[in-house]
Image (cartoon, grey):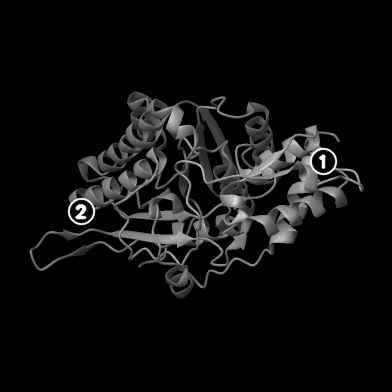
């Protein structure tokens, strides 16, 4: 593993109006100087577009504070190959972070087309553009970092989940597309010597998150007085990871592309790495919901006398879901000294406060 500076680099972030992508863009604008960040996002309406617009405004605020750097945003879809080709020709990004993807396990059961388009075709287009960035002896892309998911572990019984585990039995199309990304990246790293690192994210949460995530959806329903369904009768455990902790890890990884080496056969040893990025501290879903409720009351999103028990419904597991996610993050800790330090209550408090402000409650 080598170390490269992000200063004076051109960094492409796909899915830049997304949850993790937007936080990453803000973090880079704030902590790296000078830098050029190019964001791309199709701004689709899978969930409330106003949240995506809010995130973009937050990046613009950060960019305004740092006039020595530049931020530009392109509204386009990574599944459009011509757009990606032209973007690479014009901007010649040196570091590419692919966060664009159709997210969500349950949505993939009813809307498979969009997963194939974004997660497979879109990622293939990024890989092809990285490959051709070296044409004519150009320096090209120094590091491709891309989002994978803890979903790839499927129904694995052994915990904590390790990147050494076999992950050949996905239980959702979403998980299958993410595993496919890892396989494609490995093939391209081997064939074209593209340094690439995949990151398997574990249940990321925080302010301005995705409304389809449990904590956000629960909040919406509780506010309307609707019942919330807690799957597997509350016997689910999730490795919840606060978004700023995740982004800190992504930034460390961006600066450390796997080294290009030649094997005994004279061919490239694929400069390929894969890490879990999570909290390695799974929380019971019922405890999580209890803390969420307390913090929503504290932030005055819900009234003091809210009858929480009457709104809780314990139901069986849903198709495509897994009972436990639990990350073995020791390789990330060993290589980067990475350790998330945001406690669940603190993270949910920040979410509750953001929610109150965003929705003007």
Residue drawn at the location 30% of the way across and 41% of the way down: 127
Kindly give the residue lying farthest to the right in the view shown: 304
Position of 123 with respect to 41 (left or right) is left
- Residue 22: where, in percent of width, then height? 59, 42
- For residue 57, which numbered disc appears in the image? none
- x%, y% of residue 144? 37, 50
Using the image as rendered, state which of residue 1 and residue 71 is in the foreground: 1
Confirm whether residue 242 shows in the render.
no
Which secondary structure, mark 2?
helix
Badge 1: how crowded within 10 Å, few (<14), some, or many (20+)? Answer: some
Quadrant (top left, top right, bottom left, bottom right) of the N terminus: bottom left
Q: Where 201 sits versus 84, above or below?
A: below
Q: Residues within 10 Å of mark 2 (few under 14, many from 20)?
A: some
Residue at the (82%, 39%) spot, across then down = 357
First in sequence: mark 1 vs mark 2: 2
Is 276 placed left or right of 218 in the picture?
left
Q: Could you tell me how far apart the alpha carbons at marks 1 and 2 are, in whole angstroms?
A: 48 Å
Query: Which of the labelled discs sits on residue 356, or is there none?
Result: 1
Labelled disc at residue 190: 2
Residue reaching furthest to the bottom: 334
> Is there a contact, CB below 8 Å, between mark 1 and mark 2?
no
Instruction: Name the foreground residue: 187 vs 310.
Output: 310
User: Vertically, is 80 above or below 334?
Assistant: above
Of the 4 image quadrants, the one containing the C terminus is top right
Give the mark toward the camera: 1 or 2.
1
SS type, badge 1: helix
Q: Is residue 108 visible?
A: yes
The number of discs equals: 2
Q: Position of residue 70 (x, y in %)?
A: 57, 40
């Amino acid at each position: 593993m080598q170390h490269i500076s992000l200063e004076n680099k051109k960094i492409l972030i796909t899915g830049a109006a997304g949850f993790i992508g937007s936080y990453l863009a803000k973090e880079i604008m704030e902590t790296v100087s000078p830098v050029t960040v190019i964001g791309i996002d199709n701004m689709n309406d899978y969930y409330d577009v106003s949240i995506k617009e809010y995130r973009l405004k937050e990046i613009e605020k950060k960019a305004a504070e740092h006039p020595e750097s530049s931020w530009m945003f392109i509204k386009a879809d990574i599944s459009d190959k011509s757009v990606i080709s032209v973007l690479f020709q014009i901007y010649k990004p040196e570091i590419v972070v692919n966060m664009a993807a159709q997210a969500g396990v349950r949505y993939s059961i009813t809307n498979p087309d969009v997963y194939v388009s974004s997660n497979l075709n879109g990622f293939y287009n990024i890989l092809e553009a990285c490959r051709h960035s070296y044409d004519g002896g150009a320096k090209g892309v120094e590091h491709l970092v891309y989002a994978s998911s803890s979903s790839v572990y499927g129904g694995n019984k052994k915990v904590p989940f390790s990147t050494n585990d076999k992950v050949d039995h996905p239980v959702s199309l979403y998980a299958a597309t993410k595993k496919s990304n890892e396989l494609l990246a490995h093939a391209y790293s081997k064939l074209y010597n593209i340094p690439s690192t995949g990151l398997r994210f574990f249940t990321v949460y925080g302010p301005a998150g995705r409304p389809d995530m449990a904590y956000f959806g629960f909040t919406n329903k509780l506010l309307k007085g609707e019942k919330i369904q807690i799957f597997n009768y509350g016997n689910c455990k999730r490795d919840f990871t606060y978004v700023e902790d995740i982004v800190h890890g992504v930034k460390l990884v961006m600066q450390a592309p796997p080294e290009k080496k030649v094997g005994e056969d004279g061919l490239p040893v694929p400069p390929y790495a894969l890490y879990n990025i999570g909290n390695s501290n799974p929380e019971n879903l019922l405890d999580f919901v209890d803390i969420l409720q307390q913090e929503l009351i504290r932030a005055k999103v819900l009234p003091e006398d809210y009858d929480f028990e009457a709104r809780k419904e314990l139901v069986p597991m849903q198709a495509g879901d897994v009972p436990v996610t639990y990350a073995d993050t020791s390789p990330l800790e060993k290589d980067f000294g990475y350790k998330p330090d945001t406690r669940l209550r603190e993270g949910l408090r920040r979410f509750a406060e953001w929610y109150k402000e965003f929705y003007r409650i």
